[in-house]
Amino acid sequence: MATTRVSNANMMTFNEKLSRFSWLLFIPMFVVLIFSIIVLFSAGGGSWFPYAMSQMMKMIFGMAIFFIVAFSNIKTWIKSAYFIYAIALILIILVTFVGDVGMGAQRWLNLGFINIQPSEFIKIALVLALARYFAWQNSVELSQFKNYIIPILLFIVPFIFIFLQPDLGTGISVGLITLGMFYIVGANKKWFLIAFILGLIVSPAVWYGALHDYQRDRIITFINPDSDPRGAGYQINQAKIAFGSGGIIGKGYMSGTQSQQSFLPEKQTDFIFTMMGEEFGFIGAFLLISIYTFIVIMLFWASKTCRNRFGQLVCFGFMLNFFVYYFINISMVLGLMPTVGVPLPLMSFGGSSLISLLFGFGLCQNAHIHKDQQLSSRGF
């Protein structure tokens, strides 16, 4: 591939960058963040503590990261893509040996002043690394399987450690992100068929040898919700009751009986969508899904309008990440998928998910700001 000209986009002033800033992507993101604080205030029983104030502090920190990333030089992220991935991978490995255990899983790393969940950061780091790798591959290289060995390793190594935590939801997410990236760069379609067949072949071994008892129970409960209503099926049954009781307009702010009387488990994290549905009804849930869908459309548009391949792939990869986040979470809490630990993006209580997402949004804003910049081939 021939070396392309580097434009003067990297010499832009701050005001020029600000003029290219995508408010159509920022505003809906910020609206969801504010709505999150409102819902978490309700989850705390009408108190700023323990959820709303903590989340607001994390949001302020995350927004600082967002703006720093958005207005920096795009070459910074190209050059540091593999380094960021390596740091995230090291954190994932450390969790396996020295991570804190909570709710039956070893997913958190205690850094002394804060607990982080490295599996949330690896999703963004993987997008960066794959975008960096594929950005300067030409069509001939992309048609050869040998050039996918490194990307497969970039995926499979963290996937193994995530699966061991265990964190099935994040494992599924990174798998779907990788498949989507492979598809968009033009991987041979027959490779996807082969991967699907291999997956079917090994599925019995995974079911009996790799999944934990509670994970199998969740899948069985998904197939037959009444099989264990007081055990594995309790969460999803309470979630359905809460969401369904909200009706069209909801029971009113801070008036949800299932959530306020603590019948709904994890109402501030994985099941925050059902709490919101109980209080704001179908209309509130529909509006949130509409905003999420608009964000996905804007991320897709940012990818389509970016003239450099790295920016295209970063926006597309993060779009997949964001879509998988909310699709799995909403499907899970409505009983359309087995229960897995995936937070609702920008809404669920928790710092690792929020900060990693705001970092990803910053990367996409950066790509949009530098969308007209032509980057030198393999020059980093």
Image (tube, rainbow, N blue to C red):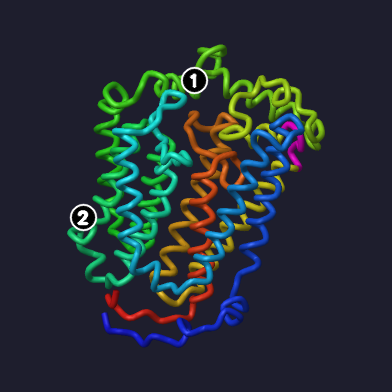
Residue type beneath disc 1: Thr
Give the CA distance from mark 2 to mark 1. Answer: 37 Å
Pointer 2: what residue? 149
Above or below, 202 against 362 in this view is above
Question: Disc 1 marks which residue?
Answer: 221
Q: Which residue is located at x 56 percent, y 46 percent? A: 345
> Relative to 315, is 340 above or below?
above
38 left or right of 235? Answer: right
Residue 282 in the magenta stretch? The answer is yes
Q: Which SS class for mark 2?
A: helix
Task: Compare residues 153 and 217 and report the one nearer the observer.
Answer: 153
**Left or right, residue 215 beside residue 194:** right
Left or right, 309 with respect to 187, comes to: right
SS state under label 1: helix
Q: Residue at x 68, y 38 (%)?
A: 40
Query: What's under tag 2, amino acid-wise?
Result: Ile
Whole-percent x, y for residue 272 in the image = 63, 35
Q: Residues within 10 Å of mark 1 (few under 14, many from 20)?
A: many
Q: Viewed as shown, does residue 192 lie left or right of 108?
A: left
Residue located at (24% from left, 64% from top): 143
Task: Give the extent of the magenta segment.
Answer: 278-283
